Image: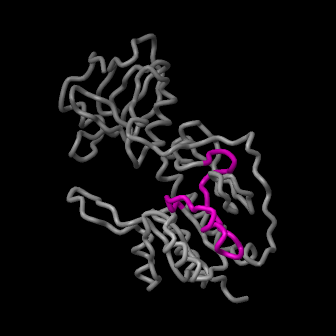
Amino acid sequence: MNPPRTIFAGTPEFAVVSLTALIKAGITPCAVLTQPDRPAGRGKRLTASPVKMLAEEHGIPVMQPSSLRDESVVSELQGLQPDIIVVAAYGLILPQNVLDIPRAGCLNVHASLLPRWRGAAPIQAAILAGDKQSGVCLMSMEAGLDSGPIYMSEVVAIGEHDTAGELHDRLASTGARLLANNIQAIVAGEVAATAQSDALASYAPKVKSADAAMDWGRSAAELDRLVRAYNPAPGAWFMLGDERIKCWKAQPCELGDTPAGTVVAADAEGVVIACGDGALRLEVLQHPGKRAVTAGEFAAQTALVGQHW
């Protein structure tokens, strides 16, 4: 069987894993769609996306439109005559006239067990909600947000200490394997897709920095999930004086009746702060512009016990 003529649309590291799997399976895309270069790093230099860098390594033509609603972009995609467009964390909406281009449709590698957690941040949402499992779906795309029928899915367990970064890597690997193993059968029409139930849908909007603020009035269990959900980005944070402190690792612990926000211990094991329910031991902290340090090292820099944050 000849490999399907494929356009791949993706931008971050999650998508790189799927693109790599396609190339290794002998399905090198005829073109790659990825987001325009963005400023990055302290110098804010224009930086290519991880997908663009991989595509250029393999000599794959790269398209970087700021929108897919430009008729010249649509015409160029039509001229490529793809059998399928594979989308993995691309970041732009595919309008109907683009969805209609490939003869076998557009296929999305989505990092949740749809219809749970449609939207931009399903990995973070699953951890925040305390879900015990996540997974990857191969979904036939339609105009609605992640609402298309599902070809297949695979469950990935969420460990009680998993960060979003760790779960991301397992989901990316699972999605890449599902894609490479099944794309030929999907293009050949050998796999049936099952409709989602809109009534069971939940949504995971794009993450904002404000979402990662630590409110000590919440329970320690909730704050533990928040720290893990926003590691590595944007990083859970709280204000200490006029500084925004990042927290990269924490553990819930037991505590008696102490007002939320009170620092009750600060030693080599961590900084313990009372929460609305229980307490949270902060274990890795970071001042703005500085390296992350153990909470013991952080606590040694100033007297914290008895402070109210």
- Screen quadrant of the N terminus: bottom right
**Residue 62 coordinates in the image, percent (x, y):** 44, 77
Pick whichever, 309 or 73, lies toward us: 73
**Residue 105 coordinates in the image, percent (x, y):** 69, 70
**Residue 200 coordinates in the image, percent (x, y):** 73, 40
Q: Residue at x 23, y 41 (%)?
A: 288
- In the displayed structure, would residue 265 be above or below residue 283? above
Q: Residue at x 42, y 70 (%)?
A: 64
Report the span colored magenta: 89-118
Q: Residue at x 36, y 19 (%)?
A: 261
Residue 282 appears left or right of 162: left
- Of all residues, the one furthest to the left in this rendering is 301
- Screen quadrant of the C terminus: top left
Pick whichever, 132 or 149, lies toward us: 149
Pick whichever, 42 or 294, lies toward us: 42
- Say whether residue 117 is magenta: yes
Q: How many marks?
A: 0
- In the displayed structure, would residue 221 be above or below residue 293? above
Q: Residue at x 46, y 68 (%)?
A: 34
- In the displayed structure, would residue 303 be above or below residue 227? above
Q: Quadrant of residue 82?
A: bottom right
- In the displayed structure, would residue 202 be above or below residue 150? above
Q: Quadrant of residue 236?
A: top left
Residue 302 appears left or right of 126: left
- Say whether residue 103 is magenta: yes
**Residue 182 coordinates in the image, percent (x, y):** 71, 72
- Of all residues, the one furthest to the front in this rendering is 71
Q: Main secondary structure of the magenta part?
A: loop
The colouring scheme, among rainbow, by chain, secondary structure or one colour, is one colour
Residue 231 appears left or right of 42: right
- Of all residues, the one furthest to the bottom in this rendering is 2
Pick whichever, 76 or 253, lies toward us: 76
